Amino acid sequence: MLDRRQLRDFDVGLAVATMVIAAVGIAMIYSATFNSDATSLAPQVQRQLLVAGIGALLMVGAVFVSQDTLEGLAPVLYGVAMVLLVAVLLVGVGKSGERRWFDLGPLTFQPSELAKYAVIFALARYLARRKTKLDRPVHMLLPLAIVLVPTALVLREPDLGTSLLFLLLLPPMLYWAGTKPILLLFLFMPVISMVVAFNWVAWWALLALLGTLLYVSRMFMVDKIILFVTSVVTGLLSPFLWSHLQDYQRHRVLAFLNPEKYRFSTGYQLIQSKIAIGSGAAMGKGFLQGTQKNFAFLPERHTDFIFSVLAEEFGFVGCLLVLILYLFLVVRMLRLAGNVRNRFAGLVIVGIASALFIQSTINIGVTLGLSPVTGMTLPLLSYGGSSLLVTLASVGVVLGMGLRRMEY
């Protein structure tokens, strides 16, 4: 139980910033779904308000769960999340034939949102062990397996954006656990090789650079051979993997590279998003006054492209204030991770901060045309009950670990 002295250390700033972003999100969802002829709130607003209330209670409740309890439950949470990911492939529902959600009547639940944090807890539990070695690629096999299982399952839904997020959670947590940056670079060289392989000249140059770096490194010869061969194989498999993506996924990548060519199909969202953001200028058009949104030019405006609505109605200044709030959350969490004495708690906080930063960066990058459309929500801001629920609960976990920062 928490004593009064610990409760005095409650991070009010972190809690308030979280709820402010969630409140802004509800306001933006209201604007994105606004109908002047309607006599009641849009269903999306009603659901988001309901979930926000439940999420706030979960956030408060999570504060009182000890880090020892969370560490003990990490394998159970991971197992439950994997079972749910398998189950959703069998009985799940989706908008266009995909299977991503469980239909719970008035609400839906997306298990991949829970799986993100289950992976964070499982990785933190493994990496927190004092006997865990992280100085050779072979030592990374289990952490990689923890991440690859949900990655493969979510990719089957299919949900490429969320599946990539699982992989992106691994580097910051490995780094915080003590892995050297050069080893992290080597470990993710196969992924880089897979992307670069679409240009054969660049791919051969990459392999030459990798070979040189491995030659001068002090790694075991078997590790060098495994890394180099894996990078070559993943590069050669790039055309195969590309051909096995869903049609809409390939079209999104092509539209990102040349949106004007696909302006009447998959590039339409991106172009309309840029128009909305640009038309907001410095101060925006005002709440409920966005024309791209009002005339329904901007698809998915209350979910994946909620940032575009914010930019159109509140301009650069409004966007900057929201970005400052996100940055405040991430920096506050990382500072807290450096202050807690419990190794598991520090790794969990880093994982949650990384998930928040990565997902926010990708979503905003999509609206600005800096990344292909991934279908990834903006945490706390976008419409999405599952995302809001688990994000608020995760902030509660961070707040609770902050209160116990002096415990080992």
Image (spheres, rainbow, N blue to C red):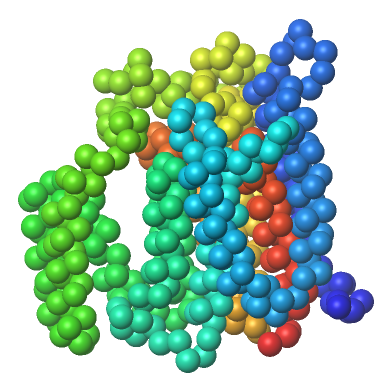
Residue furthest right as drawn: 4
**For residue 131, side relative to residue 41 (left or right):** left
Q: Is residue 93 above or below residue 11?
A: above
Residue 282 visible: no
Q: Considering depth in this image, is 243 or 334 the residue closer to the camera?
A: 243
Q: Report x, y in % for residue 390.
A: 66, 53
Residue furthest front as drawn: 90
Q: Quadrant of the C terminus?
A: bottom right
Q: Report x, y in % for residue 381.
A: 64, 40
**For residue 385, side relative to residue 231 (left or right):** right
In the picture, residue 31 is in which quadrant?
A: top right
**For residue 157, side relative to residue 242 (left or right):** right
- Residue at x 18% of width, y 46% of height: 240
- Residue at x 15% of width, y 70% of height: 228
- Residue at x 65% of width, y 78% of height: 72
**For residue 24, side relative to residue 298 (left or right):** right
In the picture, residue 295 is in which quadrant?
A: top right
Q: Report x, y in % for residue 261.
A: 26, 20
